[in-house]
Amino acid sequence: TGLILDANQSYDQAAARKWETWFSAWGNVLWFEEPMPFDVPAEYRMLRSALSVPVAGGENVKGAKPFLPIFLENAIDIAQPDVMHCNGTDDFQTVLQLARHFGKRVSPHSYDGGLSRMYAVFGQACLPPWTKMDGEDIEPLEWDAMENPFTQLVPVSIKNGCIQVPDKIEIDTELVEAYGWDGSSYM
């Protein structure tokens, strides 16, 4: 079973490099996610050269324009844009396409809702496949397990660990009506 370690940008270069002791001993680490803040992409490039596992990140990067220096610096192996942090769905799709142009894998981050999850699924499904190599026919889609009533707004079918991309989106209108707000009170 693969393991993904998410540091939530909590380390500096020296602390993040210390993880290599474990990475070189563990054979099941898929990637190290957001070990440091993204304000200096060159720091990420240096870290990537010191680690034996891929480096991923970008869930809080605010769209295609801020991703460009990250790609130009070759700072990450796996791009993780979040549609909720981009400047609309076109900007999100542009990040995914830029990642491919720069030879990067993607694992879109999806948080807080059925529609953002569905857009991440459709956005990734529209990309050309990453590789044709045996055993590497998918790229994971990261979505937080935190549930709220609206995560079920658009039902998602998962079979054998794979998301089934629907032919069409059907919104649970009864759920929308059940949580309708008349604007009168927050109580």
Image (cartoon, grey):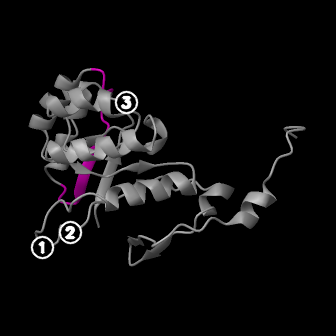
What's the residue at 14%, 42% (across, down)?
102
Q: Are marks 2 and 3 in contact (CB under 8 Å)?
A: no
Query: In the drawing, does residue 134 fall left or right of residue 9?
Result: left
Q: Is residue 37 magenta?
A: yes
| Residue nearer the viewer, 47 or 64 | 64
In the image, residue 177 sits, relative to residue 57, either above or below, namely: below
Secondary structure character of the magenta stretch overall? loop
Residue interval drawn in magenta: 26-39
Most distant residue in the top direction: 40
Q: Is residue 142 magenta?
A: no
| Residue nearer the viewer, 68 or 140 | 68
Q: Earlier in the sequence, mark 2 or mark 3?
A: 3
Residue type of the residue flagged with mark 1: Asp
The x, y position of residue 161, in whole percent, is 38, 73
Q: Which residue is mark 3?
A: 10
The x, y position of residue 76, in whole percent, is 20, 38
Q: Are marks 2 and 1 in contact (CB under 8 Å)?
A: yes
Q: Which residue is mark 1?
A: 134
- Mark 2 and mark 3: Cα distance apart in space: 31 Å
Query: In the drawing, does residue 100 fall left or right of residue 34?
Result: left
| Residue nearer the viewer, 142 or 31 | 142
The x, y position of residue 155, in whole percent, is 57, 69
Query: In the drawing, does residue 75 fall left or right of residue 164?
Result: left
Residue type of the residue flagged with mark 3: Ser
Quarter of the image for the C terminus: give it: top right
Element marked by disc 3: loop
Query: In the drawing, does residue 152 fall left or right of residue 55?
Result: right
Q: Which residue is mark 2?
A: 137
In the image, residue 150 sits, relative to residue 46, either above or below, namely: below
What's the residue at 32%, 48% (across, down)?
5
In the image, residue 136 sits, relative to residue 91, either above or below, namely: below
What's the residue at 41%, 34% (across, down)?
60
